[in-house]
Amino acid sequence: MKLIIAIIQPDKLERVKQTLSEVDVFRLTILDVQGFGRQRGHAETYRGHEIAINLLRKVQLQIAVNDEFVEPTIQAIQRGGRSNETGEIGDGKIFVIPMEECVRIRTGERGEEAI
């Protein structure tokens, strides 16, 4: 079992959800987050003054999957989250973390059955 954490652009969320559903991944948690990576924010003009925006709005997806779904999930997120064929700085990151245990609260099921 793995926990996949993906940080993507907010405007790519619907497309990523669509590509995930194409590979039968329907269970996910979505969080609004802020941060910056290589692009280090940007500047905006507000009432004639330039303001540095250091933290950019992003969307974080948390997806628990069984081992056989790891690679299809990663590929789906990449397809849906890229800005174009080659991608651009700021498109996001995907982290894959081992998950020791999963427990369904309602039934008490554990492990792969609980996902």
Image (cartoon, grey):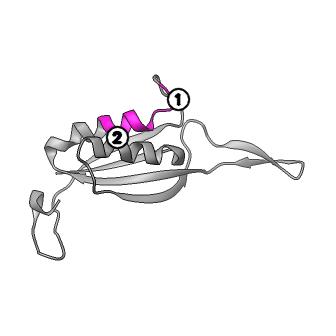
- Start and end of the magenta stretch? 75-84
Q: Main secondary structure of the magenta part?
A: helix
For residue 105, what is the image quadrant? bottom left
Element at badge 2?
A: helix
Q: Mark 1 packing: few (<14 Cα in 10 Å), some, or many (20+)?
A: few
Vertically, is 25 above or below 71?
Answer: below
Residue in the foreground of this view, choosing between 101 and 65:
65
Q: Residue 77, how many percent across, how many down? A: 36, 40
Residue 79 highlighted magenta (yes or no):
yes
Identify the residue under disc 1: 88
Which residue in the rendered view is the most extreme toward the right?
Answer: 48
Q: Residue 6, how many percent across, how many down? A: 39, 46
Residue 12's tag is: none
Identify the residue under disc 2: 19
| CA distance for labels 1 and 2 | 19 Å
Point 48% across, 43% down: residue: 12
First reached walking from the N terminus: tag 1 or tag 2: 2
Residue in the foreground of this view, choosing between 45 and 39:
45
- Residue type at mark 2? Thr
Q: With 100 as the anchor, is 95 left or right in this view?
A: right
Point 23% across, 37% down: residue: 71
Residue in the foreground of this view, choosing between 37 and 73:
73
Point 52% across, 50% down: residue: 58
- Residue type at mark 1? Glu
Point 17% across, 70% down: residue: 104
Q: Mark 2 packing: few (<14 Cα in 10 Å), some, or many (20+)?
A: many
